[in-house]
């Protein structure tokens, strides 16, 4: 039994009938303190919440029961589904975020997240590949949990989509970037769409495509997040699409 503190939030409503819970969505709070984040998530005027909040010391707060719809994803989309709140459980991680001094997520917080995520995925029968970040489902609006989040650690625990150990990125593929048009861009868009990202198959490297590329880099290639689909980024997109389609 994972210990949690009950910190009820009124910011929730009934889940939609017939919609499965099939996404676990991770966020950072992006506020200056844990107390401020908890207050906002429980403030009816804010109209925002999550199911859980995990402090940096590993303390877990339950804000909304899992059988209720928390208000955490906003305008978002993954693999064609747009009401992400209706089909997800949201976890907020206390972290000041990019605006207030973004920093690594401490061990106690990550350990608590790993245990909670494994428990939720098991109980709710959420496909492990559908453990996602807010930036994955809302790439034009969100950066969290960001490039300092340890997705590789969750992957080692069996949580989240991740490249296979034998993945070797190509080295001889020309980069594509904002404003370019052509078959290489369309192929990339198809791969990003197969993974789950919100793109349109226009053949034009438009702002939506750039946002999806940036989100993919932030999740899977965090050492350089620039929105340019270089050879490594394209290789990752095609490789992850192959895994997602399997």
Image (cartoon, rainbow, N blue to C red):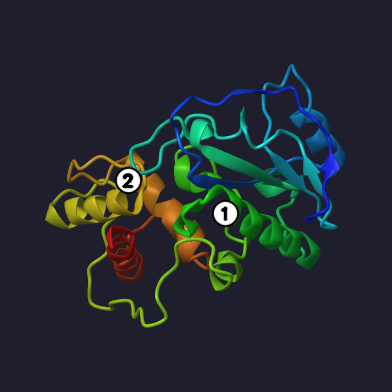
Find residue 68 and report its image quarter.
top right
Name the residue carrying label 2: 209
State the image coordinates of residue 165 (x, y, percent, origin top left): 42, 81
Of the image marks 2 and 1, the number of the one nearer the N terminus: 1
State the image coordinates of residue 142 (x, y, percent, origin top left): 54, 41
Query: Going 60% across and 51% down the picture, which residue do you hit?
Result: 123
Q: Is residue 132 above or below residue 107?
A: above
Tag of residue 29: none
Q: Is residue 178 above or below residue 83?
A: below
Query: Going 78% across and 55% down the picture, which residue do you hit?
Result: 2
* Left or right of 167, for residue 31: right
Q: Is residue 242 visible?
A: yes
State the image coordinates of residue 122 (x, y, percent, origin top left): 58, 56
Q: Is residue 124 above or below residue 63?
A: below
Of 106 and 1, nearer the camera is 1
* Left or right of 23, for residue 56: right
Crowding at mark 2 (Cα within 10 Å: few <14, some 14-19, many 20+): many
* Left or right of 114, for residue 43: right
Q: Is residue 67 above or below residue 16?
A: below
Query: Going 28% across and 78% down the picture, which residue do you hit?
Result: 171
Q: How many marks?
A: 2
Find residue 61 and report its image quarter.
top right
Query: Going 17% across and 48% down the picture, which residue do you hit?
Result: 181
Q: What SS does tag 1 mark? A: helix
Q: What SS does tag 2 mark? A: helix
Crowding at mark 1 (Cα within 10 Å: few <14, some 14-19, many 20+): many
Find residue 67 and report its image quarter.
top right
Name the residue carrying label 1: 121
* Left or right of 54, for residue 145: left
For discs 2 and 1, the disc positioned in front in the rendered view: 1
């Amino acid at each position: 039994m994972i210990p949690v503190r009950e910190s009820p939030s009124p910011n929730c409503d009934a889940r939609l009938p017939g919609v499965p819970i099939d996404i676990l969505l991770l966020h950072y709070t992006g506020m200056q303190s844990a107390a401020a984040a908890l207050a906002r998530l429980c403030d009816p005027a804010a109209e925002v919440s999550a199911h859980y909040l995990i402090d940096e010391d590993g303390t877990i707060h339950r804000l909304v029961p899992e059988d209720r719809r928390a208000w955490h994803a906003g305008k978002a989309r993954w693999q064609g589904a747009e009401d992400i709140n209706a089909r997800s459980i949201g976890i907020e991680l206390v972290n000041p975020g990019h605006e207030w001094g973004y920093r690594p997520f401490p061990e106690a917080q990550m350990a608590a997240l790993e245990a909670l995520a494994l428990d939720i995925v098991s109980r709710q029968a959420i496909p492990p590949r559908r453990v996602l970040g807010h930036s994955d489902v809302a790439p034009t609006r969100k950066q969290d949990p960001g490039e300092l989040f340890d997705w590789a650690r969750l992957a080692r625990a069996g949580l989240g989509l991740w490249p296979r150990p034998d993945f070797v990125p190509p080295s001889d593929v020309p980069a594509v970037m904002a404003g370019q048009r052509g078959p290489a861009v369309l192929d990339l868009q198809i791969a990003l769409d197969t993974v789950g990202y919100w793109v349109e198959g226009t053949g034009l490297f438009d702002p939506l495509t750039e946002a999806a590329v940036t989100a993919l880099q932030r999740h899977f290639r965090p050492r350089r997040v620039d929105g340019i689909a270089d050879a490594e980024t394209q290789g990752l997109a095609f490789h992850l699409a192959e895994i997602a389609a399997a």
